[in-house]
Each structure stands twice: as C-alpha cells, then as structure tokens.
Image: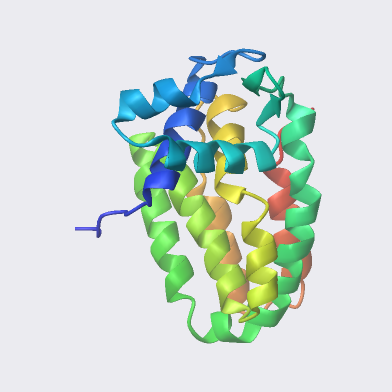
Amino acid sequence: MAPPVVHSLREQIREHILEGIVGGRWQPGERIVERRIAAELLVSQTPVREALRELESLRLIESAPNKGVRVRELTAADLKESYPVRAGLEQVAAELAAESLAEDPSALEHEVAALYAADAAGDSEAQVRHTVAFHRAIVQAAGNSVLLHTWESLGIEVWTTLSIRWLSPEPRPHAEDHARLVAAFRRRDPAIRELIKEHVLSCAPRV
C-alpha cells in the first residue's frame, strides 16, 4: 500500500480553490471571498489568504483595491508560457543528474509504476501527482538547491493540473513517455538534455 500523501493546510486550501476554478465554481472575473472559504472549510482566514496569495503569484487570480480577489481570464497561451522556462531548468537538471540517475533510477521508476496504475484507472489527479513527482525527482537528483527552488517557484503542480484536467479533458496515458526517459537515463543517452526538452515542451497546451 502506498503511503498517504500529506499536504499542509495551505496546500489543501490551494487545491480546494484550484478545483473550484477548474470545475467552474468560480468563473473568470468572479470574486473569490476569503471569509466564505474559511467558513466553508472551518479554518481561519490566514491559511486561506496564504493560498490565495500563492495563486495570485502564479497569475491564476488577481486582486485590486476595494474589489477583492477575482479569477483571471486564462487561455492556453497563459498556461503555455511557463513550459519553455521549465524545459530549460529541467535540461540543466538532467545534465547534472545524469550519472546518479543512470546508476539508480529507482525514484523515477517508482513514479512510472504509479503512472501506469493512474493511466489504467483514468485517475487524472494521480496522473498530475506522479507526473510532477517524476520531474521533481530529476531536479532533486541534480543536487542544486538554487535550481530546485527556481523550479518549485514556477508552480509546476498547479500548471500541470490545469493543463491535464482543464485543457485536456479526455484522459490520455502518461506512463509510457516517462518510461522512455527512464530508459534514456539508464543507457546514459548523450541526448538526454534534448529528450527532456522535447518531452516538457510536448506537454504544453496547444494554443
């Protein structure tokens, strides 16, 4: 049995709000009332405010004096913007992590196995979770804290959620693509940087 996934209260609230945006509870331009969310979830307004601040930093919502917080009008082009930046960071990570992942790709293999299960079940939430964990494992294997911090600041999980669940409503498999990357690390493929770049860019929403 897989260990439970533990999220902080702020992360849980962020996911709740994100689910509302993806699911259409809050339409573009509609106000999100901090006090109502706190009452609904039986929490104080502080973690709600923190979650909203994080979503605003990712440009999913916007705030204005005397108008409160509202959902931004998002397009595929908005979602696509972070992917070239992410691809560049992961190219660096792949180069730095290549040797260690060639010797021990078990962290990647664990996520691929979970992706096969998620694909079979059509579980988009698990697909997001294990896709992000796979790429985070590559960045962590690079052993560079600045690189990891910069990668994390892009809000990969949020954008992956929106890309998979909002703009790709029809389920599609994700495990095979990631299994091919594991194989490339195992055989010490000299083209791993380009393979990572192509993979990340292929995940970007089509404008």
Find residue 190 and report its horizontal and vertical position in percent.
Answer: 75, 78
Q: Nearer the viewer, residue 3 or 11?
A: 11
Please give the name of the residue rendered at 49% of the width and 58% of the height, measured from the top-left corner. 133
Relative height, residue 30 to residue 116 (above, below): above
> Quadrant location of the C terminus?
top right
Q: How is the image coloured?
A: rainbow
Q: 57 or 191, which is in the foreground?
A: 57
> Residue 23: where, in percent of width, then height?
48, 19
Q: Is residue 2 above or below residue 73?
A: below
Instruction: Place residue 44 in its image quadrant.
Output: top left
Residue ID at (48%, 38%): 14
Quarter in which the N terminus is drawn: bottom left
Residue at figure coordinates x 59%, y 43% from the top left:
54
Q: Is residue 115 above or below residue 18?
A: below
The image shows a total of numbered marks equal to: 0
Q: Quadrant of residue 60?
A: top right
Q: Position of residue 162 (x, y in %)?
A: 58, 33
Residue found farthest to the left: 1
Report the residue at 69% width, 23% height from top. Answer: 72
Residue 53 horizontal side relative to residue 90, left or right = left
Whether residue 90 appears in this view of the structure is yes
Q: Is residue 12 left or right of residue 73?
A: left
- The residue at the far front in this view is 66
The answer to whether residue 183 is seen in the rendering is no
From the top left corner, tell me how far across and down residue 123 is, in percent.
Answer: 38, 36
